[in-house]
Image (spheres, rainbow, N blue to C red):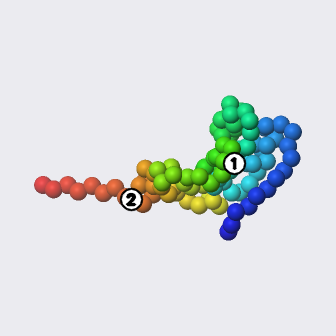
Amino acid sequence: FGPVVLLVPFRTTQEAIDLANDSKFGLGCSIWTDDLLEAHRVVDSVHSGMVWINDHHKNGPASPWGGLKKESGIGRENGIEAYSDYTQAKSVVIN
């Protein structure tokens, strides 16, 4: 397992989204553009657990980290979302 960089030319934004989503992996991706409005629209369409815009691999400890597809891990690390993966609720009733 390691970082993979792939550069593929595309003609339209939809083609770029389709190329990005045509993978069994979905841990993280970067969108590089001058058009931030378009970047935010693409974020909603890309199947990735972490998306960076004009940057890559910055992640604060409060920001959830994890993939959206099974091959990219299960659950979340960091942030409040991790509590659900690392804890289990238990009820105790005393009479």
The quadrant of the picture occupied by the N terminus is bottom right
Q: Residue at x 64, y 46 (%)?
A: 52
Q: Secondary structure at mark 2?
A: loop
Q: Marks 2 and 1: CB-CB under 8 Å?
A: no
Say which mark, if any, is on residue 30.
1
Q: Position of residue 74 (x, y in %)?
A: 55, 59
Label 1, secondary structure: give it: strand
- Mark 2–mark 1 Cα distance, whole angstroms, equals 31 Å
- Residue type, numbered disc 2: Thr
Pointer 2: what residue? 87
**Is residue 13 visible in this depiction of the protein?**
yes
Which x, y percent locates residue 84? Answer: 42, 54
Viewer can see residue 69: no
Instruction: Give the residue drawn at x 79%, y 38%.
Output: 14
Residue 17, given in percent of the width and then of the height, sits at 75, 42
Quadrant, the C terminus:
bottom left
In which quadrant of the rendered view does residue 38 lie? top right
From what the image shows, is residue 71 above or below residue 39? Answer: below
The amino acid pointed to by label 1 is: Ser
Depth check, mark 2 against mark 1: the one in front is 1
Q: Nearer the viewer, residue 84 or 29?
A: 29
